[in-house]
Amino acid sequence: MERLRLATIWLGGCSGCHMSFLDLDEWLFELAQHIDLVYSPLADVKEYPEHVDVALVEGAVANEDNLHLIRQVRERTRLLVAFGDCAVTGNVTALRNPLGAPEALLHTIYVERAEIAGRMPHAPGIVPRLLDKVYPVHKIVPVDVYLPGCPPPAPRIRALLEQIIAGGDIRLTGRDMIKFG
Amino acid sequence: MDLSELLAIAEHENAMRRPICIRCCTALGCQSAGALSVKQRLEEAVAEVDRTDIEVLGVGCMGLCGHGPLVRVDPVGILYEHVRAADAPSIIAALDGGEATAPQGDLQHPFFTLQKRIVLENSGIIDPERIESYIAAGGYQALYHVLHEMTPAEVIDVVTRSGLRGRGGAGYPTGLKWATVAKSHGDRKYVVCNADEGDPGAFMDRSIIESDPHKVLEGMAIAAYAVGADQGYVYVRAEYPLAIQRLQRAIAQARRFGLLGAQIFDAGFTFRIDIRVGAGAFVCGEETALMASIEGRRGTPRPRPPYPAESGLWGRPTLVNNVETFANIPPIIRNGAEWFASIGAETSKGTKVFALTGKIRHTGLIEVPMGVTLRQIVEDMGGGVPEGRVKAVQTGGPSGGCIPAALLDTPVDYESLQRVGSIMGSGGMVVMDDSTNMVDVARFYMEFCKDESCGKCIPCRAGTAQMLHMLDLIRSGQATAADLARLEQLCMMVKETSLCGLGQSAPNPVLSTMKYFREEYEALVRG
Amino acid sequence: MAARTFTINDQLISAREGETILQAAREHGIFIPTLCYLDGVSAVGACRLCLVEIEGSRMLRPACVTPVVEEMVVRTDTERLREYRRMIIELLFAERNHICAVCVANGHCELQDLAIAVGMDHVRFDYAFPRCDVDISHPLFGIDHNRCVLCTRCVRVCDEVEGVHTWDVAGRGADARVITDMRQPWGEARTCTSCGKCVLACPTGAIFRRGATVGEMERDRNKIAYIVAAREQRW
Amino acid sequence: MAVTRSQPPVPEQALHPSGDNRFKLLEATMKKHQYRPDALIEVLHRAQELFGYLSTDLLFYIANSLRLPPSRVYGVATFYHFFSLAPKGEHSCVVCLGTACYVRGAAAILAAAEQTLGVKAGHTTPDGRLSLETARCLGACGIAPTVVFDGTVTGHQTPEQVQVWLERLVKRGE
């Protein structure tokens, strides 16, 4: 059987979903027999490769880098998985949305509420610009599978990956698979 | 008060009439255009020439509101339009062969000749501020007749056989509603007149009350007798101060004449009417919300059943009908069920009053027999659009739909309008020309519904907000074909799951424009 | 009391006279989702989750307020109802900021349970991300409007069971908010007896006991029905 | 037939200490309705007529008098758009946004008014001179588009006319 080209992506999130992925522990060895990890924050790959079979996307789309990357991911991936609550709903990353436009928000945080001599962060070309709002992944590009959870527990990740490896339709139902939070 | 006194009042009133009568419309539209100063100037002009054979009468709506202030000279039958106070002396002089400086209207125009006036029979003719004027036109005789010569069951039978259906929108058979209330048990029963005319673009009820308030009161009293109620409420929206004022005056006069209150016509029948003024909530047009509002609560609807006919105000049987429905009652009693049933269409009897507005030459109020076509109304009576072509006609307000020009031959009756995706509604008819963008129109109505949603049930509260958002995405070019499909799906859900009529019909303007003007949506979506 | 027999999902069921479809269904272990419904207080038919199809009726009917009628044929789980229910739940999630991960009711939340029950793996509508307040002026309890679904269970339990009517709804439509007294901070609402029934009644993490950890937010909703029964039967 | 009804006694503390005559007038309205809770909306109408808006203080006074829970009074007062819980400007300009007015260009009129005044609909100018509002259809569709200046309904309006009227008013204030 052909090995799946798997990627994991880290957008606007806390990396907790990746930690949960690592919680798969020894099952990771079994997984390694079915997949090649072609792109991941856990691996040192600079450019998102072509012809990826499965991408687990952690995090919401919060800045211009996220936006660029997710579009590339969508173009080059067969099965895109919104991986965890931030990717599925915006979740904690989107907590800034009710507070208004990013400039005003940054001003509040870095100037008004600064304890000493606050000033606006300014690092063009280094820190990516924030988008007007934080978006769940499916608002930006089509998503094929949604895996909620903050983070999705390791058994849930395993159950999904097993379905993917087995091929056929993917069906996630019930508390074990789709509970948020 | 007995019949002979009533007839004596009528006789006295008629005897006071002068040979020449100059009628000035004093309803809201003409008042806003300066009708009161016109009337005053006319009175002065009559006095200046010292003519005792002329009288100047303030009357209700003459219909052609867009051409106001309107003045009509009888019996010669001349209509003056856009009258200014300065025109007054010339209008008087014209009686002796002079030239009037105000433009003359054409009373032979289809706008007038195609009308059939039952509800509006006295509008623009009698003085709405004087009960004597209504009595002189035969007013309150139907009530006398009912109280002295008919049993409640007979009254209900007449109304049932007349085929009258509710004029508030849904078209429920009036006789059936009355019979249910009559049959329901309660230590007290109520009659409520729904004058919370909230549909933007509709002003039939306002005009009826401003022009002929006693007719509505008489209709309510007949209904109260038929169903066994002793207390009535008229729920009027606060946006209609003139209507409220005229109604207050009418109730006070009727009470003074013994036509409301205890022992009406010495027939052992007691009926009081109080006014309840709304406070700006469209949803209160829904009958359960309206009742909550009369009880002094938030105007949120509740699930039906139980229907108000069984459990309404304070849990008692309550008859709720709208202004125009009640105004139809005295003529039906006077002329009989067969007469009424002979007018109109197969399943929709009688006439319907429409407020004809929007991009149309002759805006105003018309009353036509059910079954005339939209084309007759828009093109013949309304004179078509001033520039360009008719694109669509919107009926039924935010609950209705947009009917495309291609379907103008649709007859106006409850079923036909429903078949083309709209509703009769309360009678607002807004004409749109080809400069109107239909997605914008859908958005206009959706914003209205979102703002007016009471917030009680989720589909309406959150669904209207979401539909509005999706329309905005479409308008700003950010939506995809998939979004369009999702919007349609959402519309169906809100329509089928909302608690009350507001939510159930909120998607109609979107659904009907998507059906008939889909290309306008598709032009805006990506990919 | 007379019995009524009727059919739910092809299953013949008997009910007592005056019973609602929801009551009868629950007695027979048939699940109909609800959110605004709460045993012990009046039913308002507002959340529309318990809508069912009734043969011969064009309209969908809320099971919580529709009495059983002899020989009525009810369907509770058709494709159409499943789709509508999921959309209703999605609309709720999109309407306010329901962030399960940082919610006190995570794991003990009726809205979360419903999302699972209707198979909601994501929300297809755009989130509104409204700005909502949190009021922790009361020494014992707090209210987080981000989590409120406007079910009015707090309003009804306060009015009908505790009898003080501290809660009501202000505004309308999407701007509606549950309020205490004259929309004062809860801690300043003089009518509040601090009985905590609203905390018990709240289906989500909107009304909570302060200082309680997520694990302690499990609420015994039967308590409300118990209090009502105790009062009516005067034990 | 004379009916004698027992009237609930007016609680002592309900008489407002400020001695404001308007409270006496409000009291008369409540008395006319026999302090019945179902008269709440009528009473709120009268209160707003007398005081211009419904302050929290006033709402408490009404709640006390009609023996209604404060939240119920607040809930009703905020449900209906006609009631205002904040003071209004000296003058008012209401742009009708009913369908007939909309089709005949009400949106442009509103935009012109907002631009002239520098405030959005539903707000009062910072100097308190004028409140700009919108209405849901005044039923004066025959003369659309309609604008109400200080209670006077005027028809067939254009953005320019409205602008001139507002400018005159705002200038006069300077």
Image (cartoon, coloured by chain):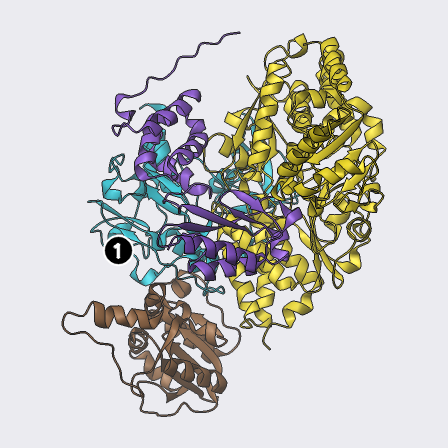
Chain colours: A brown, B yellow, C cyan, D purple
| SS for callout 1 | helix
x, y percent for residue B430: 68, 52
x, y percent for residue B381: 80, 48
Label 1 is placed on what type of residue? Val
Location of the C terminus of chain A (image quadrant): bottom left
- For this orientation, the residue located farthest to the front is B49
Q: Nearer the viewer, residue B7 or B488?
A: B7
Hey, which quadrant is residue A126 in on the image? Answer: bottom left
Q: Nearer the viewer, residue B87 or B210?
A: B87
The answer to whether residue B512 is seen in the rendering is yes
What residue is at 31 percent from the left and 69 percent from the top?
A104
Q: Residues within 10 Å of mark 1 (few under 14, many from 20)?
A: some
Hey, which quadrant is residue C69 in on the image? Answer: top right
Q: In which chain is the residue bearing label 1?
A: C
x, y percent for residue B484: 60, 67
Q: Is residue B274 left or right of residue D38?
A: right
Hey, which quadrant is residue C67 in on the image? Answer: top right
Q: Is residue C8 left or right of residue B373?
A: left
x, y percent for residue B49: 73, 30
How many numbered callouts? 1
**Residue hosting label 1:** C214
Above or below: residue D4 compared with residue A43: above
- For this orientation, the residue located farthest to the left is A116
Q: Is residue B261 left or right of residue B139?
A: left
Q: Nearer the viewer, residue B148 or A74?
A: B148
